[in-house]
Image (cartoon, grey):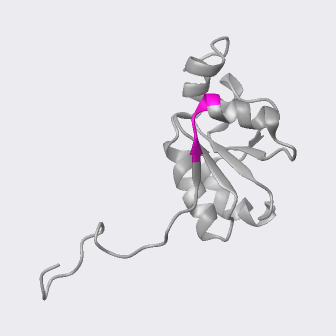
Amino acid sequence: MQSGRKPSYSEAPGPVSCMRELSSDECKTYLQQAVEKPLLLDVREPWEYRIVHLEDSRLVPMREIPETAGELDQEQEIIVICHHGIRSRHVALYLENQGFSKVINLRGGIDAWARNTDRQMPTY
């Protein structure tokens, strides 16, 4: 960095993320083998959830996470799900910032699950 200029976003130090990401196939295997079932936190909108969702998932739209994060167990593993994995990644990073340490992002979201892991699921 040159003297006298402010660091860019990419140069500025920030929190180190410990968040894991799993593909849909990795996540399915993980869920089948997990001794303690993680919370499947779906952060999409209700209309999206009505179209398709993973069994036993809990719907909490992204916009409601700041109000509901305090209701979640920081010690429970949480797999965050959205349509393509973008919103869920943001929520997972937010949860990490709030002190959650066992957060996993479903890479590619429910769309990847429907296209790669369970092709019987509807897509939108």
Residue 74 vertical position relative to residue 52 in the rendered view, above or below: below
Residue 60 vertical position relative to residue 9 in the rendered view, above or below: above
Left or right: 41 as drawn, with respect to 18:
right
**Position of the C terminus by quadrant:** top right
Left or right: 39 as drawn, with respect to 96:
right
Extent of the magenta region: 21-25
Identified at 52% across, 54% down, the residue is 90
Q: Is residue 10 magenta?
A: no
Could you tell me residue 49's position as x and y percent? 68, 31
Residue 51 vertical position relative to residue 100 in the rendered view, above or below: above
Quarter of the rendering containing residue 92: bottom right
Identified at 71% across, 30% down, the residue is 28
Could you tell me residue 65's position as x and y percent? 66, 57
Could you tell me residue 63's position as x and y percent? 60, 53
Quarter of the rendering containing residue 119: top right
Seen from the viewer's position, the closer of residues 15 and 124 is 15
Q: Is residue 24 magenta?
A: yes
Seen from the viewer's position, the closer of residues 72 and 112 is 112
Identified at 61% across, 65% down, the residue is 96
**Position of the N terminus by quadrant:** bottom left
Could you tell me residue 21's position as x and y percent? 57, 46
